Amino acid sequence: MKSGNKDDPRKTDGSLNSLDRRLNQTLKSVQGLLKVPGKILLSRKGTEPAAPSSSASSENPLRKDIDDEAGTGPRNSGVQSASTSKVDAPRSNGSNRSDGVVENERPSSSPSGSTGSGKGSSADSSRPSTGGRATDSARVARFRKELSSPAVNLDALRELAWSGVPPDMRPTVWRLLVGYAPPNADRREAVLERKRQEYVDCIPQYYDISDADRTEDERTMLRQISVDAPRTVPDVPFFQHPEMQASLIRVLYVWAIRHPASGYVQGINDLATPFIIVFLSEYLEGNMENWDIAKLTPEIVNNYEADCYWCLSKLLDGVQDHYTFAQPGIQRLVFKLKELVRRIDEPVSTHIEQQGLEFLQFAFRWFNCLLIREIPFSLVARLWDTYLSEGDSFPEYLVYVCASFLLTWSDQLQQLDFQEMVLFIQHLPTKNWTHQELEMVLSRAFMWRVMFQQAPSHLSSG
Amino acid sequence: MAYRSDDDYDYLFKVVLIGDSGVGKSNLLSRFTRNEFSLESKSTIGVEFATRSINVDSKLIKAQIWDTAGQERYRAITSAYYRGAVGALLVYDITRHVTFENVERWLKELKDHTDAHIVVMLVGNKSDLRHLRAVSTDDGQAFSEKEGLFFMETSALESTNVENAFKQILTQIYRVVSKKALDVGEDPSAGPGKGQTITVGNKDEVTATKKVGCCSA
């Protein structure tokens, strides 16, 4: 659907400019991540720039440039190869694509949508270091300012946090982002204390009881959780500590008992892990490998577990039907992903279809575990920064993230037959990924969302 | 390509691995296809997949094996993958009796979602944990005879009987398929036409496929 609002006066208003600016910054940052020369043009309809340097002038200049830049980027082969072929690839829905240029008329920030690599990122977009943005001193100062406010402005915090949160601020920021800690500083401690106590009270009530007092379903669930606990991030030894295992089981079991519509579903154990490491980082110093949870007092264990429990609950509240019977939420997102990929990259989409590969076969795990299984564990906290900043828009954004993730390997996929594709996608080569590759995926997802939200018929189904 | 597969085979059989969570399905698969075992494996979410080719009666049989998540909540998703399977390894853990008790439910799953001629083998895994055994070999054997299943105890960790289990089920499938081919008036030694699907299945399902030459199926 065309926006059909070329002359819409709203396009010149402040909020629009602000969106434009943010998108420009996102683009710059994508460009920065790829370390490529040249500039990414971004225009509104009516001020469309002369065709960018090379061919394919009929295409949306935005797309074209990004493709080019990605394609020529010397950095990491995964990302680089993601787009090389797309420059010349035939495109579907060319007419829609021009809408992608950012004359977006929606209010400048959907709850989430806000930010891309938000303000302040342009300066450091060229930083080569991993997670450079999260530790940029100007950004850190802005986080501090925001957090020290008597009433934290959550929209501003989301915008900042979307691009990465400095590790030492993560616990505080995450508690705020998910709506567990109140923005009002005066009330914060009291609320946290009350909620922590609520969790602690659940333990004797639900967990520390004899098996005879559990229902058959509860026994089955506890058994399942106990089978999965030792298989949670098994490659990180810290998670194998008996106390850590017990802690994880308690959090998951209490969550499951209090969410009977879904109960515990395999993979939810994975989703608890970013919260565990972040909230433990308030009490344990240094490298996680050397952490010893046995050193913590029972009170600290209670507090950190309660924080994990509540934040996990808040995260899962937004995707509840991912885990109910037949997992309709996931099925719906998989369908949307398939549609989106078809819009963005028809050659890959066609290839996947011709080979008989169902999106459900690989994307199910992606949605079920929110991609946590697909990237190195060291990056999941960074991934969570963006997820939690998305708020209510998170499930929708996740579809774009998965599309962006998949199309990182657009080229390779087209060389593979059915079986090769399945095997390749089961173990995508992300082992050596750093923040840069991850942020590339996130930024591109952000950009695509801005482009495609202008054309709702692209994703009308579901 | 790292995963470039050997495309030269006579038959392609789809086999599913099912059974309760944590019984060792994924490790049986990795032991058979890559000769690997991991104490640090994660739970399977949805389905995963691997292949290996073996020789049976001088025919090259390629097994396409689908490993499924064990938790009940995933049945709706995983049962879609049963379609077109010509073999199933139904796995339980000899140290956890409940996983053996659930075998009947798994059999019902198979009956509901697969062809009646599917070859099923009951597999009691973790036979290396002798001191923790909770299901006797006799019980496993007796149950299998009653239900008309093949039976084997394995240890993916010690690599005991894993190869045998897969070989036996693939051989049985081959026999069933050859017999079917005969039943429909074809000489298995001459072989049906290129890429012909022998057993039932949907058009896009890879089930038991006989290939001639090196063309892609």
Image: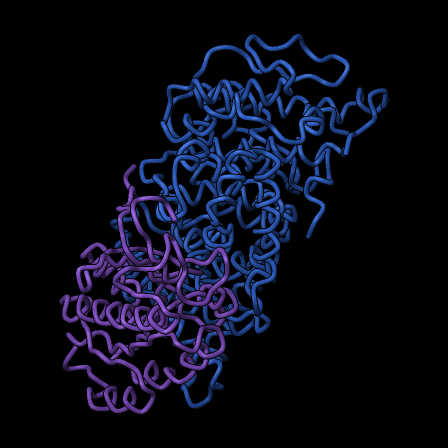
Q: Quadrant of residue A328?
A: bottom right
Residue at left offset 55%, top offset 64%: A323
Q: Is residue B129 left or right of residue A353?
A: left
Q: Position of residue A78 (x, y in %)?
A: 38, 31
Q: Position of residue A299 (x, y in %)?
A: 41, 64
Residue at left offset 67%, top offset 31%: A93
Q: Quadrant of residue A97?
A: top right
Q: Nearer the viewer, residue A226 or A301?
A: A226
Q: Nearer the viewer, residue A354 or A290?
A: A354
The chain coloured blue is A
How many numbered circles are shown? 0
Above or below: residue A292 compared with residue A338: below
Above or below: residue A384 compared with residue B181: above
Q: Is residue A422 left or right of residue A319?
A: left
Above or below: residue A408 compared with residue B210: above
What's the colour scheme?
by chain
Q: Is residue A419 left or right of residue A255?
A: left
Taking the image as drawn, is residue A295 in sight? no
Q: Nearer the viewer, residue B57 or A101?
A: B57
Taking the image as drawn, is residue B203 in sight? yes
Residue at left offset 48%, top offset 30%: A440
Q: Position of residue A236 (x, y in %)?
A: 28, 52
Residue at left offset 23%, top offset 67%: B166
Check the rendered structure and report the hue given to chain B. purple
Quadrant where the N terminus of chain A sits is top right
Q: Nearer the viewer, residue B80 or A430?
A: B80
Q: Quadrant of residue A249?
A: bottom left
Q: Position of residue A199 (x, y in %)?
A: 52, 68
Above or below: residue B95 compared with residue A350: below
